[in-house]
């Protein structure tokens, strides 16, 4: 049997070849662990501004997206507290949570005070450090006297002999002022944190989800179980209020909504397509064969993508599966021609099928060069899936459904296809046949002119902030939680890097100098930074040296003082007088504590194997400090250390990029803005890549059909894509990344219509019916996506609906007159 320009291939050989290719692709996929990724952040592109710290940014994001907060409220504090206790008891040991937090140790503040007392000489804030550095004894003394003798002072004076300047109290105050505690409306009562709003008292419950918790909704999902428990608590206690905050609640709600939406959209579109195919073919065989083609294509594409990338993102599967739906066109053409009486279908359709396949593949191959993992995954998925569909039609279908080998003279379809509905195709073709040449030219001229205003208004931009809309309940919960926490974390923040932990803190301190200036200028109210609480080693050592100079009047090695037993005598006269004034008789206690206190705080420690390892932030620090450090200290990634600095309550004039300018180890990050910029840039790159691919396609068409016919063929998908873009412009809808993916799909599908019309001719009812059926199934499957409330899916579906509809009506002009 002849195959592809004279290559002879038997049916048996074709089946063996089909099995071998699919087996290789599937075995390669099965050779690696399968992982379905649902994390949106994992596939979002990095902008050039943060590529150097992208792993640190992802680590920080992976922590924050697992945090949840539940506020349980009631007009009676005891009722709210009891409900929060019941919630905590229900989920405290649940494996879906890494940790839960309701109760605050009553001794937590005492533990904090003891910690900062122990490190009072090293963990001082900027104000006290400046007093040390300037030798400002009077300010240091007056501050302490005010605390000691003040009427409303709550300062603990039990350590006055060791700490006559109350530096432990100063270090603790610095922590409070530079932590979320200084802004939050939550206070401690009966071992829980509570706040009041609108006559209701809200008790805070926090939790961190385990890393293995899926983002997909299900009845057994931890968020679903939590919602059920909270609903039960509200039913059991009238008047109970609940506010839920955190990314997991949004992910669950969005996933749950998407599941139900996709279920009915897919259900309706599948039923309509099946009814349409059943009406045309009057047999389940073509339907089952078509569905099998798609299923095999999807599975092969899935396995191959897993092998290439190590995982497959759910977006790749959703959009890739839709793109594989193009393969239905191949099957439709095969079975329509077969039912029309064509005895060697493959020979009849192979030229149009092969050219359509190659042009579509070239478009997706071009996309593999885009610097965006999701786009590359979708491209590989589609390349392999379409290859599978093409091989199934040309090798397997030919062997299974064509029983005789005939010459090329027996390949033409009947002029009036038997047992096929031809009324609509006849009307369709007659409408085009009646158009004079000048009428065709006029239609195209008016069409192009109509596109121009829309294209002029087109805005190519992607804003992921528009991809999800909170429902009223979640929106109210987030508003209340934000109001009571009162953090006001800005969209822009900073990631700081350093080769070692102390270098990182020094780099952070350079940034905080600029933030302090911005604070004075009213650009930012406050900010959270590790170095504000735990200074760099340079500052810690400098604090002790400066204080020794202030206390002793001169710098003297403490070993000399110990040897000569000069503790009291070495104190500066003004310091001795001050100690006497406040009733400290034994001056040696203070001197010893100062000289022997060299306990620096570091983020590295030496383990039993003499290796430097990161400290345990959770267990090596008091609880309240630990929570703050875990929020800000990203830690060791690769060969560097990273931390985050978070500005709070910024003004409209605050410019993070400007503040970070000139600091080589500081990166300003605005996740949403960076992603939007990167996606918009990738959109332009994708259009350019597909443009290059289409230029190659055009050259191929020129070689095969000559220049004039090549123009006729390629104008259909190109004008259809411009039509979709123009409508987006007219409707003032952002032409975002997902709309561009839809246009790329239009280019891939649309050229098939033009090629088949060119090969079959405008008078061929079989070709017209096959194209019409392909277009209708595509419009039903993709057009239904335009009904989705999920913006990426809606935009993608709308772009395909507009493009394919337009392309279908333009394609007949590609045929020979």
Image: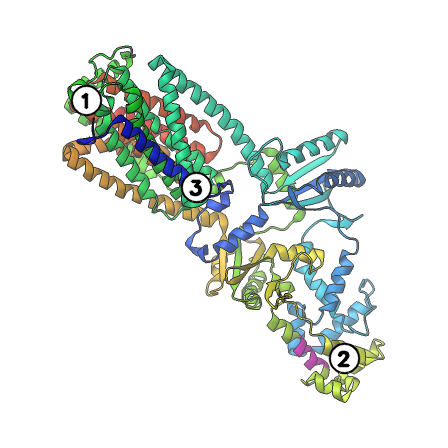
Q: Nearer the viewer, residue 804 or 562?
A: 562
Residue 352 lies in magenta, yes or no? Answer: no
Q: Which mark is residue 591?
A: 2
Cα–Cα gap, marks 3 and 1? 42 Å
- Above or below 504: residue 458: above
The image quadrant of residue 449 is top left
Q: Visible in this render: residue 1?
A: yes
Q: Closer to us: mark 2 or mark 1? A: 1
Mark 3 touching mark 1, by CB under 8 A? no
Main secondary structure type of the part rendered in magenta: helix
Q: Residue at x 16, y 21 (%)?
A: 407
Q: Which mark is residue 661?
A: none
Q: What residue does disc 1 label?
A: 761
Magenta-drawn segment:
544-551
Q: Closer to us: mark 3 or mark 1? A: 3
Horizontal relation, residue 444 to residue 524: left or right: left
Q: Residue at x 25, y 29 (%)?
A: 353
Q: Nearer the viewer, residue 266 or 261?
A: 266
């Amino acid at each position: 049997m002849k195959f592809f320009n004279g290559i002879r291939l038997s049916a048996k050989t074709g089946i063996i070849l089909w099995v071998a290719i699919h087996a290789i692709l599937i075995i390669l996929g099965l050779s690696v662990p399968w992982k379905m990724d649902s994390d949106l952040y994992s596939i979002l592109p990095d902008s050039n501004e943060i590529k150097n710290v992208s792993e640190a940014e992802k680590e920080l994001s992976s922590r924050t997206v697992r945090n949840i907060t539940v506020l349980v409220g009631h007009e009676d504090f005891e009722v709210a507290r009891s409900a929060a206790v019941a919630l905590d008891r229900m989920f405290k040991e649940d494996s879906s949570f890494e940790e839960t937090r309701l109760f605050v140790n009553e001794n937590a503040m005492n533990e904090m005070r003891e910690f900062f007392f122990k490190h009072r000489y090293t963990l001082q804030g900027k104000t006290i450090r400046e007093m040390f550095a300037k030798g400002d004894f009077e300010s240091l003394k007056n501050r302490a006297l005010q605390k000691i003798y003040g009427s409303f002072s709550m300062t603990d004076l039990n350590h006055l002999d060791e700490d006559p300047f109350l530096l432990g109290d100063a270090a603790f105050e610095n922590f409070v002022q530079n932590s979320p505690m200084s802004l939050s409306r939550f206070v401690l009562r009966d071992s829980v944190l509570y706040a009041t709003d609108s006559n209701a008292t809200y008790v805070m419950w926090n939790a961190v989800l385990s890393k293995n918790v899926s983002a997909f909704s299900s009845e057994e999902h931890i968020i679903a179980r939590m919602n059920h428990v909270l609903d039960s608590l509200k039913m059991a206690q009238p008047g109970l209020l609940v506010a839920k905050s955190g990314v997991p609640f949004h992910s669950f709600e969005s996933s749950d909504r998407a599941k139900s939406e996709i279920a009915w959209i897919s259900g309706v579109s599948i039923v309509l397509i099946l009814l349409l195919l059943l009406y045309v073919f009057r047999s389940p065989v073509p339907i089952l064969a078509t569905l099998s083609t798609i299923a095999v294509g999807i599975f092969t594409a899935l396995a191959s993508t897993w092998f290439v990338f190590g995982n497959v993102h759910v977006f790749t599967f959703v959009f890739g599966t839709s793109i594989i739906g193009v393969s239905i066109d191949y099957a439709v053409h095969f079975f329509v021609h077969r039912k029309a009486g064509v005895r060697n279908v493959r020979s009849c359709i192979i030229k149009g099928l092969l050219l359509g396949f190659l042009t579509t593949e070239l478009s997706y191959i071009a996309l593999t060069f885009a610097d965006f993992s999701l786009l590359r995954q979708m491209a590989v998925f589609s390349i392999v899936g379409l290859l599978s569909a093409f091989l199934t039609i040309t090798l397997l279908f030919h062997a299974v459904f064509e029983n005789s080998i005939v010459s090329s003279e027996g390949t033409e379809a009947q002029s009036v296809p038997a047992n096929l509905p031809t009324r609509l195709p006849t009307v369709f073709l007659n409408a085009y046949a009646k158009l004079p040449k000048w009428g065709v030219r006029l239609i195209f001229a008016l069409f192009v002119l109509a596109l121009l205003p829309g294209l002029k208004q087109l805005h190519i931009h992607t804003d992921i902030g528009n991809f999800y809309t909170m429902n009223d309940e979640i929106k109210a919960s987030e508003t209340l939680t934000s109001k009571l926490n009162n953090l006001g974390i800005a969209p822009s923040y900073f990631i700081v890097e350093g080769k070692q932990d102390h270098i990182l803190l020094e780099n952070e301190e350079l940034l905080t100098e600029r933030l302090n200036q911005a604070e004075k200028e009213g650009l930012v109210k406050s900010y959270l930074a590790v170095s504000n609480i735990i200074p760099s080693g340079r500052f810690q050592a400098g604090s002790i040296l400066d204080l020794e100079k202030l206390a002793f009047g001169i710098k003297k090695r403490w070993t000399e003082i110990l040897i000569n037993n000069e503790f009291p005598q070495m104190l500066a006269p003004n310091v001795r007088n001050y100690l006497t004034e406040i009733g400290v008789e034994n001056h040696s206690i203070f001197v010893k504590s100062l000289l022997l206190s060299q306990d620096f705080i570091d983020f590295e420690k030496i383990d039993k194997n003499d290796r430097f390892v990161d400290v345990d932030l959770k267990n090596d620090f008091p609880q309240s400090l630990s929570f703050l450090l875990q929020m800000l200290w990203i830690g060791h990634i690769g060969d560097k250390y990273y931390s985050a600095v978070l500005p709070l309550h910024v003004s409209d004039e605050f410019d993070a990029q400007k503040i970070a300018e000139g600091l080589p180890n500081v990166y300003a990050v605005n996740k949403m803005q960076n992603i939007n910029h990167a996606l918009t840039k990738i959109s332009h790159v994708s259009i350019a890549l597909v443009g290059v691919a289409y230029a190659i396609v055009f050259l191929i068409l020129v070689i095969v059909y000559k220049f004039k016919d090549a123009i006729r063929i390629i104008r259909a998908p190109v004008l259809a894509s411009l039509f979709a873009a123009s409508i987006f412009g007219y409707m003032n809808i952002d032409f975002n990344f997902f709309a561009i993916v839809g246009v790329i799909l239009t280019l891939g599908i649309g050229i098939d219509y033009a090629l088949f019309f060119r090969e079959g001719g405008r008078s061929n009812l079989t070709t017209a019916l096959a194209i019409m059926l392909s277009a209708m199934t595509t419009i039903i499957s993709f057009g239904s996506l335009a009904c989705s409330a999920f913006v990426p899916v809606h935009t993608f579906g709308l772009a395909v609906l507009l493009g394919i509809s337009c392309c279908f009506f333009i394609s007949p002009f590609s045929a020979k007159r």
